[in-house]
Image (cartoon, rainbow, N blue to C red):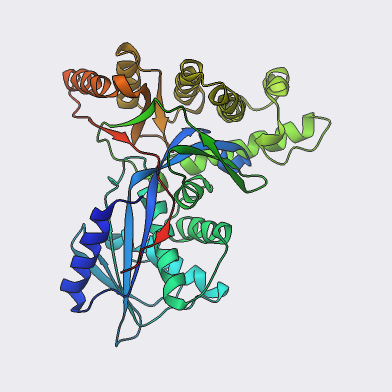
Amino acid sequence: MYDPKPVELANQFHQATYATPATVQAYAPGRIEILGNHTDYNAGTTLSTAINRGTAVVLSPSDTSGVNLSAANLDQSVHFDPTTDETMSDEYQWANYVKGVFNLLRPHGIEVDNVNCTFAGSIPMGAGLSSSAALEVATAYALIEFAGGQLKPITIAKVAQAAEQRFAGCNCGLLDQFSSIFGVPSGLIHSDFRTLETTSVELPAEARFIMINPHIEHALAESPYNERRSSCEKATAQFNSLLDHPVETLRDVSWEEFTQYRDRIDPEAAQRAEHVIAEITRVAHGIELLEQQNLHAFGQLLYDSHETSRTAFENSCPELDLIVEAAREAGALGARLSGGGWGGSVVVLARESEAKALCQSIIKTGRTHRLDPSAEITIPSAGAQIINP
């Protein structure tokens, strides 16, 4: 399952811009982070799902050297040399994600030049649904297909991650790329970022995830994301000096050890570590609850997650807090910010029979507080794929 709208738009724009049809089409979905906030770069675990919105990248050969790149949604085009490792100008920051993938695939034998490239997406940018990772992953799939090569999915994820880190300036983990690649219909993705293994987790049939977008844009590269990551690394180093076993990341610190030793490390580092270690604990508990079909208790984990986001990690904001409380008052099973934070969207867990009424109630509450939120009941979907023209 994929969203055909960005595929159609990308092909139409490509034909209109380059007067030639695309010969390769790739698609990658956005994602919802369900549990496991900021755990990926701490070698932790996450629960996420690919969604029924995504990004399409289409290609065709060009008679000129370099890459002609068009963003259909923005009606903009640029040209770049895929062999250089310099980023684009600030005016075309969106192009950096694509250029990074072109450049970083080259050491893996995927050397693409003389090409026209167009992308289009149905993921609202800045909504915390990982439009950047979807663009990176779709670009990688398209280039590998165009070059007639093969790469392991984990390698593709790492290339996409490196593109975001080196070309877009966000020191991100692998959650977004893994979710976009390993999506499963009607289920969640359990990712372990120590072993780099993924497994699917079945959802109760009545479970629905609603994305509430209060339309407050964010850009992780411009947020305190990198600062929070540094705090986690500081906490790791200090726990390593205190505990009687090696601590390479916060994954190595149990909740019991954290509560025992938290007062002996830097207060701010301890505050950030509290959220991450609690999240890793919640992921494990959440899998058990889903196996028991206990949606009510699973939903409470989402509320707990948002609370430590708000108080310990401080990556929420008043608008997201308001939406979470509106969901709670409307009777939602759970709600929390989804993604890096400091803006973006809220994921709400509901039963299918209650989902539409919840959407209406949350939107109404948001509007009374001068927000203009939108709501969408999402469908857990398959991961990235090549689409036959």
Horizontal side of 279 relative to 217 (left or right) equals right
Residue 73 in picture, x, y percent from top left: 21, 57
Q: Is residue 320 above or below residue 181?
A: above
Q: Residue at x 48, y 46 (%)?
A: 179
* Count of labels in the image: 0
Q: Residue furthest front?
A: 205
Residue 89, visible in the rendered structure: no
Q: Residue furthest right?
A: 244
Pick whichever, 17 or 310, lies toward us.
Answer: 17
Give the quadrant of the C terminus: bottom left
Residue 341, visible in the rendered structure: yes
Q: Is residue 248 above or below residue 238?
A: below
Q: Residue at x 31, y 40 (%)?
A: 127
Horizontal side of 345 relative to 107 (left or right) equals left
Pick whichever, 231 or 12, lies toward us.
Answer: 12
Residue 244 in picture, x, y percent from top left: 84, 30
Q: Residue at x 53, y 33 (%)?
A: 36
Horizontal side of 108 relative to 2 (left or right) equals right
Residue 304 in picture, x, y percent from top left: 49, 19
Residue 311 in picture, x, y percent from top left: 47, 21
